[in-house]
């Protein structure tokens, strides 16, 4: 299956792109996806403890099971206001 | 247990189920009429915040006694460094969704009649407002509390980020 990953704020600079498509085996979790992303975008890995993750428009945790076509977003702590 | 006793027990269970369902409907009706009529106005935009226009368009019922307005303005410094603006970035679709989830929670906690919130994105110069919030409620205590809570939660969950733009 394929999912799209979007990066926001300075995560775009660390990844060097605003989004990327990732091919995964069916049944993979968000945590599995992150493992792949650390290899492709090593500058993001040091951010993993403060990173926020969403699928669609809702926050999710690493055990979330991804589905074909999911839109995953990764970003640093929010700072509105 | 005799057939009569089983039948009686079934009847009691049905009665209990009916009352649970009745109480559930009553609660939902109460929640609908108490909370679901809250007016919401949410804007996330690059346009400057027109506070005068927002104030002029205020609508409140005669039972409301408190209007709390908050305006968040870009400061001239970020930490120890001078800046001339902040560039706000939002994940717009998720930000709107998360704001509405917060409005839902706020309505469950306080008897708010209206919530209006405007957040700017893009470059906002020092001295200009980046956030405007208005809460209308019957009394000041709930209006202040709801406003404070909403802004605190926004800073925790709504995907908006800021990048200070330094002078030179």
Image: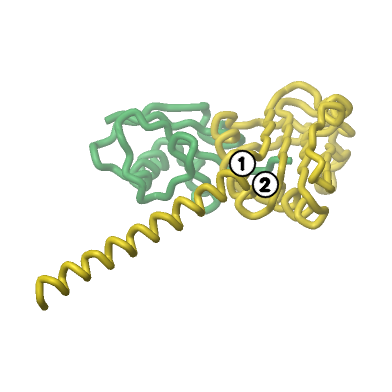
Chain colours: A green, B yellow
Using the image, name the chain to which the residue with label 2 belongs: B
Q: Secondary structure at mark 2?
A: helix
Q: Nearer the viewer, residue B166 or B163?
A: B163
Question: Which of the image's four quarters has the C terminus of chain B?
Answer: top right
For residue B158, which quarter of the picture? top right
Q: Is residue B70 positioned above or below B47 on the image?
A: below
| Residue B5 versus residue B113 in the image, above or below | below
Q: Nearer the viewer, residue A52 or A20?
A: A52
Q: Position of residue B76 (x, y in %)?
A: 88, 39
**B141 sits to left or right of B4:** right
Residue B158 - label: 1
Residue ID at (42%, 50%): A61
Q: Residues within 10 Å of mark 2 (few under 14, many from 20)?
A: some
Most extreme residue toward the front, as rendered?
B4
Is label 2 in contact with label 1 (beta carbons under 8 Å)?
Answer: yes
Q: Position of residue B84 (x, y in %)?
A: 85, 31
Mark pair 2, 1: CA separation: 6 Å
Residue B120 in the figure: left or right of residue B16: right
Judge whether residue A77 can be spotted in this image: no
């Amino acid at each position: 299956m394929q999912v799209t990953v979007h990066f926001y704020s300075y995560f775009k600079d660390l990844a060097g792109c605003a989004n990327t498509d990732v091919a995964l085996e069916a049944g993979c979790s968000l945590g599995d996806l992150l493992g792949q992303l650390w290899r492709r975008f090593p500058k993001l890995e040091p951010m993993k403890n403060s990173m926020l993750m969403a699928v669609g428009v809702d926050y999710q945790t690493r055990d979330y099971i991804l589905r074909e076509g999911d839109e995953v977003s990764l970003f640093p702590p929010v700072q509105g206001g | 247990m005799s057939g009569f006793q089983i039948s009686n027990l079934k009847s009691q269970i049905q009665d209990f189920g009916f009352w649970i369902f009745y109480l559930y409907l009553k609660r939902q009706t109460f929640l609908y009429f108490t909370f679901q009529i809250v007016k919401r106005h949410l804007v996330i935009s690059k346009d400057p915040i027109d506070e005068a226009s927002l104030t002029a368009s205020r609508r409140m019922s005669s039972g409301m006694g408190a209007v709390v307005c908050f305006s968040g303005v870009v400061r001239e410094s970020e930490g120890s460094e001078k800046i001339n603006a902040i560039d706000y970035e939002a994940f717009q679709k998720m930000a709107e969704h998360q704001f509405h989830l917060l409005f839902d929670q706020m309505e469950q906690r306080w008897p708010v009649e209206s919530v209006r919130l405007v957040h700017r994105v893009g470059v906002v110069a020092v001295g200009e407002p980046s956030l405007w919030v208005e809460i209308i409620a019957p009394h000041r205590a709930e209006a202040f509390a709801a406003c404070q809570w909403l802004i605190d939660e926004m800073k925790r969950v709504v995907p908006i980020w800021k990048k200070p733009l330094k002078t030179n």
